[in-house]
């Protein structure tokens, strides 16, 4: 199939990937737009994996204030170079991330950072609920594992569904951004404030 400049432009508008990357993706997928998007996303995953261990000592801090000053969030998003930190795409993602944090109130960035007392308390509740419902011991354990997995996915920033597009998790969006920017990107810190809490 002949790849037209309009097809490349459409794919670029859809993914924000580079022109040559879009052309290659369309060539590899015989002009199938959906497969080309998947191809670019997979490429982004590969770039992210290669860059995972690199130091992120540059970045930006963005804030979001909502509900007439009643809720606010601040996030530090890091990258490898000052050049990427100053791009509109990077700054816009940091702002979206601050908005997401204000809206979804995560407890930690990753599962490993969730305080042990929160995990233990939640697990005890799930075990008691399962036992009270009369389930046998071996079923209780499986139920608790499933419920804990769901609970942690809901409170860990990287696993949460993005409030503006629930088809993607925050980690998937970061991985996609890594593919576009060509640098390692990570969330270093975040804080959420709410009046009266």
Image (cartoon, rainbow, N blue to C red):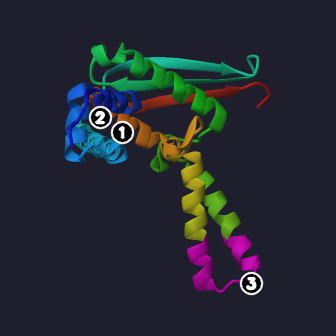
The quadrant in which the C terminus is found is top right
Circle 2 residues within 10 Å: few <14, some 14–19, many ≥20? many
**Which residue position holds label 1?**
175
Question: Going 56% across and 18% down the picture, which residue do you hit?
Answer: 63
**Which residue position holds label 3?**
134
Residue segment shown in magenta: 127-143
Contact, mark 1 vs mark 3 (Cβ under 8 Å): no
Tell me the CA gap for discs 2 and 3. Answer: 49 Å
Residue 78 is drawn in which quadrant? top left
Contact, mark 1 vs mark 2 (Cβ under 8 Å): yes
Residue 173 is left or right of residue 102, and the answer is left
**Which residue position holds label 2?**
179
Coordinates of residue 4 in the picture (x, y in percent): 25, 31
In the picture as drawn, the residue positioned furthest to the front comes out as 2
Tell us which disc is closer to us: 2 or 3.
2
Q: Please determine whether, in this image, residue 142 is positioned above or below residue 123.
A: below
């Amino acid at each position: 199939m002949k790849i037209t400049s309009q097809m490349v432009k459409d794919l670029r508008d859809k993914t924000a990937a580079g022109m040559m990357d879009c052309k290659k993706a369309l060539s590899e997928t015989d002009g199938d737009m959906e497969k080309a998007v998947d191809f670019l996303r997979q490429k982004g995953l590969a770039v992210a994996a290669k860059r995972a261990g690199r130091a992120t000592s540059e970045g930006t801090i963005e804030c979001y204030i909502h509900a007439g000053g009643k809720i606010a969030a601040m996030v530090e998003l890091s990258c490898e170079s000052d050049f990427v930190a100053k791009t509109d795409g990077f700054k816009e993602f940091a702002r979206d991330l601050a908005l997401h944090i204000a809206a979804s109130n995560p407890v930690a960035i990753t599962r490993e950072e969730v305080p042990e007392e929160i995990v233990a308390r939640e697990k005890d509740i799930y075990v008691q609920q399962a036992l009270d419902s009369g389930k046998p011991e071996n079923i209780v354990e499986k139920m608790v594992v499933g419920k804990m997995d769901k609970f942690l996915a809901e409170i860990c920033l990287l696993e949460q569904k993005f409030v503006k597009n629930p088809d993607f998790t925050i980690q998937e969006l970061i991985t996609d951004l890594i593919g576009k920017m060509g640098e390692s990107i990570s969330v270093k810190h975040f804080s959420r404030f709410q009046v009266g809490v």
